[in-house]
Image (cartoon, rainbow, N blue to C red):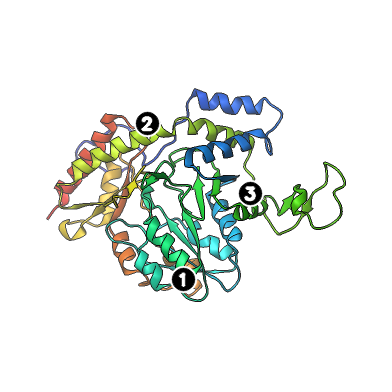
Amino acid sequence: MEKLAINGGTPIRKTKIFYGHQWVDEEDVSAVANILRGDYLTCGPAVSEMERSLEKYTGAKYAVAVSNGTAALHCACIAAGVGSGDEVITTPITFAASANCALYCGAKPVFADINPETYNIDTESIRAHITDKTKAVVAVDFTGQAVDVEKIRAICDEFNLIFIEDAAHSIATKYNGQQVGSLADITTFSFHPVKTITGGEGGACLTNDEVLYKKLVLAHTHGITHDESMMEGAPHEGSWYYEEISLGYNYRITDFQAGLITSQMKKLDKFAARRKEIVNRYNEAFKSIPEIIVQKEIPESDTCRHLYIIRLDLDKLNCSRREFFDAMSAENVQCQIHYVPVYWFPYYQHLGYEHGLCPQAEEVYKGIMSIPLYPKMTDEDVEDVIKAVKKIVEAYKK
């Protein structure tokens, strides 16, 4: 049974608005249809075109298109040489893949705490968790805000670690004027439908290092190469000949997905501009509401937000987060929670992780809630979300 709006009143909206939604137009449909009518559905020229498009936009020297963001993270760990007995430091406030990628390689995820104001991984906590087993840092640009790249870069250089930037949220974000994608040793993107641009699914790894690039290519194509310079076995016998020279996976993306992503790339700056407009309106609306804590940003990050998170100050409200969440839903504003601390999941608990590892992350998690943010939102949609938040705060405030 549907929940009634707060105090049994009329909902703010007649129709439901979701926290995220793709924008696919006729240009996108035509781009995919043209590929479907062509000769290649996979392993074709559309994939290379997508990779060149990402390189041009980000300034990275090399891009490798893969099947999804999780595959990108796995390939990144493989290229980084992560293996059994190694440790990989990451944040607990992220999707599980940011930590799972270490497990896929036989390594141990180590969770550093977050900055309680920006919600990104805390650089001093990274340093505190480094051991002689640490191989890499997977730093997540949470909500789209760039991590503190300079400090993380310095730490990784000091301890000879690979810096992997999980930029699933942050395509179109700049750090000190430079596009995310060209900053870390390896950067990973995701093109899930709620992200800034989409291929339905899809992902990518970007790097400026040719050695890492070749490892990324092998990781996502079964460890197989047609490149004579990399072959180790029999002499090259003809154009058909190839060799498997390492253990890899089938993480290829299809041409029609790549074609959709390339088409979406043409609208990326437009999407980013609209997201920034909505974020600015939310910031203005919520900054004077003491019951709502607004995520802070570092000055170095010119952020394209994937998510807009409000944090409830539950000490100032006579409700739980669940009650606030359900009240928003009753107003036909569907929110989401990003994210449950990864090590709270039963799988990680069975591995021996315990509650209390990252006190700041756990405290922030208690109050965070993602509200709608996507380019197709109208100004009226945005105002309805603001009205719903204000209405519920007013009903529950102490």
Task: Name the residue carrying label 1.
Answer: 349
Q: CA distance from mark 1 to mark 2?
A: 40 Å
Whether residues under marks 1 and 2 lie with C-beta atoms below 8 angstroms apart, the answer is no
Judge the density around disc 1: few (<14), some (14-19), many (≥20) Cα neighbours within 10 Å.
few
> Which SS class for mark 2?
loop
Q: Secondary structure at mark 3?
A: loop
Which quadrant holds residue 302? Answer: top left
Residue ID for mark 2? 376
User: Counting residues from the N terminus, which is met first, the one under dot 3 or under dot 1?
Assistant: 3
Q: Where 187 sits versus 356, above or below?
A: above
Measure the alpha-carbon separation of dots 3 and 2.
31 Å
Residues packed near mark 3 inside 10 Å, few (<14), some (14 to 19) or many (20 plus)? many
Residue 23 in the image: state x and y as whole percent: 44, 32
Q: Which residue in the structure is indicated by mark 3?
A: 251
Quadrant in which the C terminus is drawn: bottom left
Q: Which marked residue is nearer to the observer: mark 1 or mark 2?
A: 2
Give whichever of discs 3 and 2 has the lower sequence position. 3
Residue closer to the observer: 354 or 27: 27
Residue 106, x across and y down, in percent: 59, 68
